[in-house]
Amino acid sequence: MLAACSFAPPLKIPDVPLSSGYKEKAPWTPAQPADAMPRENWWTQYGDAELDALQVTLVKNSPDIAAALARYQQARALSDQTRSSLFPAISANANVQRDRQSDLRPLRVLGPTSPDQYTSATLGLQLDYEFDLWGRVRNLVAAGKASEQAAQGDLESARLSLQAQLADSYIALRGLDREKALLDDAVTAYAKALDLTTTRHDGGVASGLDVARAQTQLDTTKSQAEQSLAQRALLEHAIAALVGESPSTFTIVPRLADLALPQVPSGVPSLLLQRRPDIAAAERRIEAANASIGVARAAFYPSVTLSGLGGYQTSDIGNFIGAPSTFWAIGPSLFVALFDAGRRQAEVDRTRALLEESSARYRSVVLGAFQQVEDNLALLNHYRTAADSERSAVAAGQRSLDFATLRYREGAVNYLEVVIAQTATLQSQRSALNLDTLQRRASVQLIRALGGGWSDPTQPIALGR
């Protein structure tokens, strides 16, 4: 009956306000995700082989993932260390020594016939086992196991965060590639327009002001193209650092990549509590803190340890192993602290405060997760609507530019009208490209906020070994 005792309080996970659905709506399909289901390869939804290869390199070479893995291995080793307390500890010892007694040793006068010098040889085994009457050891093991699982959640969270960061940077880089191509096309078109304006000026048809305006438009667009390259270089360097490569030797060849926009299944808020590895880790830390209270409270009660030892001891090494040299001892020992000036109570208070902190952090992580999902659902929803409008603006801007160019060729307007149309058209084209990129980047952050992939809900993997 005593061995069934435990002073850990009943585990209670803090309540967090939940709703039946997300406030922000987007054209995504509902899902039925499972607890800690596999998150691998969610980035393949974007349909880019180079991104897939970079993600593989990230997992292999990332120093941040390696550091997170090492922290998990430390927690696992500590868990194994505490688990060993459930079993008896057995040790062996062997000792051979030559001794000389002091002539002035206390009470030596009672044994004047004992030799001044003698040989002592000992070979023995010792066993110690603590009876876990108050659940101290069991709660210690439970706290270690929960901490190990929390560290595994941290590892999964770090891996997911870095994978999302890589996907986000890659999508932004490919967006800049498309923008650079657009600006290069604009530079070509503006150079031709400058040639036309110069020819008209040489023929006395156009003014020098028109030539200056055309030159300004061309040079401004060239500057924008170079600024785009500068931003791309920074993203390329960031990707190199993420995947563990030197930015000085790492290169991503510019190309126009048509990245898909995944249909992300957002599920419902209650399922998010089961999918996010950081939420799972926060919950495990509550379990560890709760079990630690039981460990602290058990210190107020006696601890009982069974000890046994036995072996051979002799002063005649030639007759070491034999019945006359046998010794043994076995028996229980009881230990209880009678006065410690409040040390044990202070430890109980500390563990209770740790539980309160863990509970508050859990609520903070959950509420933050809901916010991230709502944020990215809102971005996806409004970016999609904005992109539809911007595509219409691009078509209208191109028609305006065509009309303005035709009227200029016919001499009906000066070049200012063409410049205004060129600027508006290029701005709407860049805005349309940017909105496409922003939608894909928001989808990455939504996947991250939802806890990763969702493709195989039939194979859940619980946190732990």
Image: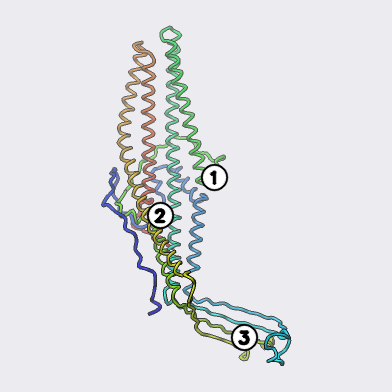
| Proximity of marks 3 and 2: CB atoms separated by less than 8 Å | no
Nearer to us: label 3 or label 2: 2
User: In the picture shown, does residue 41 fall above or below 287?
Assistant: above
Location of mark 2 (residue): 278
- Work out which quarter of the rendered image holds the C terminus and state it: bottom left
SS under mark 1: loop
The residue sitting at the left extreme is 20
Q: CA distance from mark 3 to mark 2?
A: 56 Å
Label 3 vs 1, first from the N-terminus? 1
Mark on residue 465? none
Give the residue at x 40% y 62%. 355
- For the residue carrying disc 2, how many other residues have a C-alpha within 10 Å: few (<14), some (14-19), or many (20+)? many
Q: Amino acid at mark 2?
A: Asp
Label 3 vs 2, first from the N-terminus? 2
Residue 190: give x, y in percent of width and height. 43, 20
Q: Is residue 390 left or right of residue 332?
A: left
Quadrant of the rendered structure where residue 393 is? top left
Q: How many marks?
A: 3
Is residue 442 or residue 301 the one in the foreground?
301
Give the residue at x 46% y 42%. 50
Is residue 104 or residue 293 the one in the foreground?
104
SS under mark 3: strand
Location of mark 3 (residue): 312
Q: Amino acid at mark 1?
A: Glu
SS under mark 2: helix
User: In the picture shown, does residue 202 fall above or below 145?
Assistant: above
Q: CA distance from mark 1 to mark 2?
A: 28 Å
Location of mark 1 (residue): 245
